[in-house]
Image (cartoon, rainbow, N blue to C red):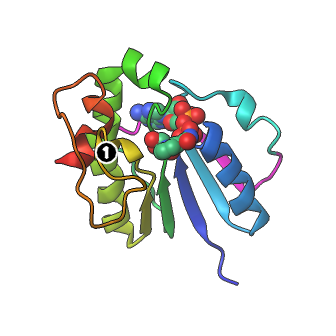
Amino acid sequence: MKNMKTIVTGGAGFLGSHLCDLLLDKGHEVICIDNLVTGSAKNIEHIDSDKFTYIKHDVTKPIYFGDKIDHIFHLASPASPIDYLNLPIQTLKVGALGTYNMLGLAKEQGARFLLASTSEVYGDPLVNPQPESYWGNVNPIGPRGGYYGIWGW
Ligand SMILES: NC(=O)c1ccc[n+]([C@@H]2O[C@H](COP(=O)([O-])OP(=O)(O)OC[C@H]3O[C@@H](n4cnc5c(N)ncnc54)[C@H](O)[C@@H]3O)[C@@H](O)[C@H]2O)c1
């Protein structure tokens, strides 16, 4: 199998750290990018693999790689209501600029891209569960707007 090089942004977070474990198990070379704003180095300290690289970096700032990147899993964002309400500007920036930077990297590298979105894109939904055809019921200037704002545009 070809050696897959995969970036996980938010890789020191709750979901991202488990995704790093899974990808390493599957033989990927994993680059975890995280600024630890809500994650913790403790979540990845058990990883003892020469196929794993941790880069402390804020993805709202550009980052470049010389080597070919095959996949980008973009999970970086404050995600709990406590965090994203405390960090509204950082949350809006990572959803907008962070996604822009990672999409640019994916385009440059021809990498496949997966974004971890949120059901907050629906606002206070009038339909449960939400099918793909439902566009949501969103207040774009409410306190939760920073978390779903970019995805609702
Ligand atoms: N956990 C859930 O139930 C859930 C539900 C819906 C969506 N999501 C999405 O899944 C993703 C991961 O969620 P989680 O629960 O693991 O959250 P988490 O807070 O544990 O992990 C997010 C990680 O992103 C990092 N991060 C935030 N801003 C960053 C930046 N600018 N640059 C680099 N790293 C940054 C944090 O330090 C953290 O390690 C998020 O995008 C979230 O919106 C999670």
**Mark 1 Cβ and ligand 1 under 8 Å apart:** no
**Residue 61: quadrant of the picture:** top left
Q: Which secondary structure lies at badge 1?
A: loop
Residue 73 lies, in percent from the top left, at: 50, 57
Q: Is residue 58 magenta?
A: yes
Residue position marked by numbered label 1 in the rendering = 125
Circle 1: residue type: Pro
Q: Is 1 drawn above or below residue 135 in the view shown?
A: below
Residue in the foreground of this view, choosing between 69 and 44: 44
Residue 55 percent coordinates (x, y): 56, 39
Left or right for 147, reference 9: left
State yes or no: residue 62 in magenta: no
Instruction: Depth check: give the residue in front, 78 or 62.
Output: 78
> Going 40% across and 47% down the picture, which residue do you hit?
119
Q: Is residue 142 above or below residue 100?
A: above
Q: Position of residue 6 (x, y in %)?
A: 57, 62
Residue farthest along the top direction in this orientation = 86
Which image quadrant is residue 133 in? bottom left
**x, y percentage for residue 152?**
22, 47
Q: Residue 2, can we see it?
A: yes
Q: Nearer the viewer, residue 126 or 32?
A: 126
**Which stretch appears magenta?**
48-60
